[in-house]
Image (tube, helix red, strand yellow):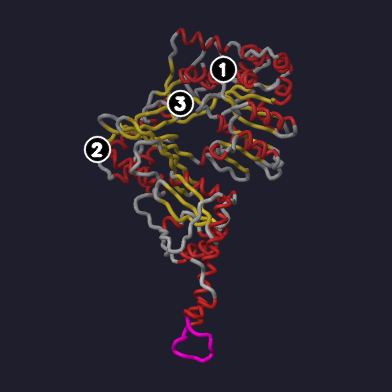
Amino acid sequence: MANPSIDDLLKQYGSQSGAPSPAIDGAEEKFEEKMTEIALKEKEKIAQSKAAELDFPYINLKGFPISPETLTSVPKELAEKLKIICFLNTGTEIRVGAVDPNQEQIKEILLSLEDKFHSHGEIYLISEHSFNLAFKLYAALPTIKKIVSGVEISEADLQKFSAEIKNFKDLNEKIQKANITDIVTMVIAASITARSSDIHIEAEEKDIKIRFRVDGVLADAAALPKDQWSKVISRIKLLSGLKINVTNIPQDGRFTIFMKDGKIDVRVSCLPTSYGESVVMRLLMPSTAGLSFEGLGLWEPAFSQLKAQTERPNGMIITTGPTGSGKTTTLYAILNKLNEPGVKIITLEDPVEYKLEGINQSQVDYSRDYTFAKGLKSILRQDPDVVMVGEIRDIETADIAIQAALTGHLVISTIHTNSASGAIPRFMSMGVKPFLLAPALNAVIGQRLVRKICESCKVEDKLDGETLARVKKILETLSAEVKEKYKVDLENLKFLRGAGCPECNNLGYKGRLGIYEIMIMSKDIEKIILSGEISEYQMQDIATSAGMVTMVQDGLLKALAGVTSVAEIFEAAE
């Protein structure tokens, strides 16, 4: 039906004569209201046409019921800046209205909302009037002080239970009598006391197993009755913002515990299993990020060699080793050493586990096609002095990193191989050109993490004849200078081990340190690379003949000094 003309409106609301009469009382106001209504309808039609033209769905939010929880999914300041409104969130579907839906930032917001709520999202085009109506709802939101109702863990909670729980036995006794809220807090407090990196809570046929990964090794910490499982898992999901009613698919979440000297980020992963969901909580401690270069546990000559390479203005330093060998910690320690006011450092990580002050950190996001290779290209336009790439895993990333190293940047990164000498064959198998790799590479670090013997229960370790002969064979190839420096007497070797005590939860070990090998580029290694005849064993022989102390040799020197055990070294590096 056609919109009424001005004449029709005048007829509807009264005559056009100037004489006042009861019949036209308030006609002007009604006339203005009708004109405004017509104008708004026209604007909605224009918005609807624009939506069709841009291929976006359209909606008029006038009178649309928007809950406070849905509205606040997008902060008020951001909504006002981008003219965006979150108007629907059903738990599986999320809808956003925008005056200009083609803005890249709006698409990024929708992606983050999809990740946060584990929902499918869509952007709708709305008119300016529609936005203004919905935006007024922010003003109606009550300002309420945040109430903590059993879904947060405070530093005071942790301190209370840390004082009460000194070992696994204490934890097992106390959680049998505690309520669900306290059980989860006790477990986290005990794991921090035990210096655990991960908490594993696993539903089994008869009970619930709680295990801590302490110094890289899983240890049974406690057990709970099976009938408490649903309550425990619900509490953990509440803490980490996961859906309580979803049990048949994996979920990932996180929460943060704020402490006086920093914060502890807890990453949570839930996985469905035969007897219920398995939960793993990774504790990201701030102390690891603050590790100094000197605190890595590098001994001479490795320390001086690596220190010299970090002071070079360009080239590549690569760390190698399996998952959990401390590669990222080494990279962070190098970054901490290089982090000075006159140095621009940018990192590309997956994920960014620790925030480092004074360093620009970027996280790759494969869902948005932001890969290591594409991110590295962008980083190089930012005029960095030092670039850290979390991992080199393909030829494109490797080529860009090498070009960066050749054009005046210091590049540090990791690659998955078992030893320092295996890094170059790995690069070559990716398809890296030998004549580019040889001049770009400064040093390769091979490393492992081994457990330190508990100081409270050290006893002498009597090695059997076969093991002793094996140790002697490895140590006798050390250079005369190294043997003299560390007082290696092959005829009188003494080692220690941990007997186990309450201080170390009867594990015999407390804390970890790195064992390393540093392969510095030399003319002989460069010649092998350029020849194309790449052999890991050849390079190992050349590096050791040039004085490189291998990982196992470095480990045995530390065992000889009573820092770790021979068994630990052979398990990690042989």
Secondary structure mainly formed by the magenta segment: loop
Q: Looking at the picture, does residue 510 appear above or below residue 544?
A: below
Is residue 23 among the parts visible in the rendering? yes
Q: Name the mark nearer the viewer: 3 or 2.
A: 2
Kindly state the secondary structure of the residue where label 3 is placed. Answer: strand
The x and y percentages for residue 199 are 39, 35
Amino acid type, mark 3:
Ile
Q: CA distance from mark 2 to mark 1?
A: 51 Å
Q: Which residue is mark 1?
A: 553
Q: Name the mark nearer the viewer: 2 or 1.
A: 2
Task: Point out which mark residue 227 bears.
Answer: 2
Q: CA distance from mark 3 to mark 2?
A: 39 Å
Task: Point out which mark residue 453 bears.
Answer: 3
* Residue positioned 29% across, 31% down in the render: 275
Specify which label sits upstream in the sequence, 3 or 2. Answer: 2
Specify which label sits upstream in the sequence, 3 or 1. Answer: 3
Q: How many residues crowd around disc 1 within 10 Å: few (fewer than 14), some, or many (20 or more)?
A: many
The quarter holding residue 531 reads top right
Q: How many residues crowd around disc 2 within 10 Å: few (fewer than 14), some, or many (20 or more)?
A: few
Specify which label sits upstream in the sequence, 2 or 1. Answer: 2
Q: Which residues are magenta?
A: 13-26
Q: CA distance from mark 3 to mark 1?
A: 18 Å
The one nearer the camera, 207 or 515, is 207
Left or right: residue 503 compared with residue 349: left
